[in-house]
Each structure stands twice: as C-alpha cells, then as structure tokens.
Amino acid sequence: MDNKKPMKIVLIEDDVSACRNFIECANNRTDILFVGITGRSDEGLEIVKNKLPEAVIVDLELNWGKGSGYDFLDNFFKTEFDIRPLIVITTNNRSQDIYTQLHDDYRVHWIFCKLQEGYGPEMVIRHLLTFREFYHKQQNDVNRELKTLETPEELKDCIMARIRIELDLFGVSMKLKGRKVAEDAIYLLINKDKKDVDTVFNDLTKIHKTHYNNIVRNLQTAIHDAWDNHDDPEALLKHYTAPVRKDIGAPTPTEFVHYYADKIRRDMF
C-alpha cells in the first residue's frame, strides 16, 4: 500500500443521489479513487475481489438495489484476503443494538448514520484517510511478525505486545490496577476464544487473587480514567470506534474487553 497513490475505494450504494455526492467528492480530491460503484451486494463482492480496494463503503439497507449490506458482509468474511479492506457502513438506522452487532459480529471499522448532523461523503472519506496509514502499517507489521513465530511463548509475547499498544493508544494508565486486568482479560478472550466475558472475569479472580466485583471495578475505573482524561478526545474515538451508550458515557468493561479482543483477533489471525 502506497500512501502517495490515491486510496482505492468501492462504493456499494443504491441511492443515485448518494452515489453522485460521493463521485463529486472524489472529483474534487486527488487522494481517493472509486474503482467500483454498484447497488448490488453480490456484484459489490466481486468488485472487491477483483479490484482489491483499501476500503469499502457499504449502504446497510440497499432498498432499491439487490441484497443488503448484511448479505455483502456475510459473504465478505467468508472470503480470504491478504489484507482486508477497511469496512465502512452507512445507514439510516439509529439502533445501538444493530451498531453493536455490526462491530462485534461483522467487525466493521466505522458506522455512519446518514441522519446524524454533518453527515456526508467528506466526513466518511476524512475518517478513512486519517486511519489509512496506521491500519495498513499495523497489518503489515503483524503479518511479518507472525511469519517468524516459532513457539507458543513467542506468540503470547506478540499478542501481549499488541494489547499493550492498543491500551496505550486508548490511554489506559500503567499506574492503575485495571491496566493489568485489562491486558489479562483481553488476552484470555483472544487465547481461549471464550464468548462469555463473565467467564474470563471469573478466571481473573484466581489470577489476581481478588473478588469478581474488584475485577470489574478496577477495569471500569481504568476505562473511565482514560475516557475522561484523554489528551485528544477525537483521537480516542479513532482508536475505539464502537458505539457508546449516552447514558453511560464510556464503554462498559464487557464492551471494552470484547471490542479489543475481537479487533486484535481479527487483525492478527
């Protein structure tokens, strides 16, 4: 991936007006290039396989096209790619449950509600370009590291190093007890492939020799400390892209551990 070349993007969108707006946006820039546009989910997957774009922008509903964003995602994750493109979902749906499902089950990188204030092609493209260099460097570095690993201990060290990088980017302080709890919880969820975070938290009571409530409390304190005191809130949201409930104001321990376990498992394996 050469950052000096335009970013290749595929657009799966059936709204003619929306497609026109994205095309106009691209015509006014030199750093992006749409290599395929379609309103069909099946055709979109074929374009992605043939064109190998860096990013795919997918309309979730495709009311006037064929299939849906879900159809595309289902088939996309059955397909092998050397480096998976970034996936952006656009939708008129405001459901937090659907957003959580898209992040957790389909591993999308961003979700943009078309009804949100300021939404438009520029907003979507800006996010893609901001994350472009970091994402591809990260994947290439991980691929190189994994090819040279020989023992389970080396693999664990590699996973733990990646976890620490992610927690540093999020801003979880090394001084808090919850930092080590977060590292261990994410690693256990990745390594054991457990679906139930409660089981992981119970395992941590033995590792840290404390009560379940203390595990959850320490982790929650670390999350809120980072969330409330991050030097750059906008940068924070680039690293943690899952939706956050407004009544809570920060990720819950369960959401936080699931998000990073899924993210790291997806990128490394």
Image: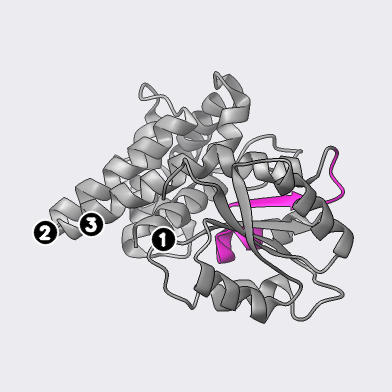
Q: Which residues are magenta?
A: 100-117
Judge from the rendering whether residue 31 lies leftward or rightward of residue 23; answer left or right.
left
Above or below, 30 against 230 in this view is below
Q: Secondary structure at mark 3?
A: helix
Mark 3 lies on residue: 146
Foreground pick, 241 / 39: 39
Numbered label attached to residue 151: 2
Position of the C terminus, as image quadrant, is bottom left
Horizontal and vertical percent for residue 17? Answer: 88, 59
Quadrant for residue 44, please give it: bottom right
Which amino acid type corresponds to the residue marked 2 in the rendered image? Answer: Thr
Mark 1 lies on residue: 83
Disc nearer the start of the sequence (3/2)? 3
Q: Is residue 185 visible?
A: no
Q: Dot 2 surroundings within 10 Å: few (below 14), some, or many (20 or more)?
A: few
Q: What's the residue at 70%, 70% (across, down)?
A: 69
Q: What's the residue at 67%, 40% (across, down)?
A: 29
Q: Secondary structure at mark 1?
A: loop
Foreground label between 1 and 3: 1
Disc nearer the start of the sequence (1/3)? 1
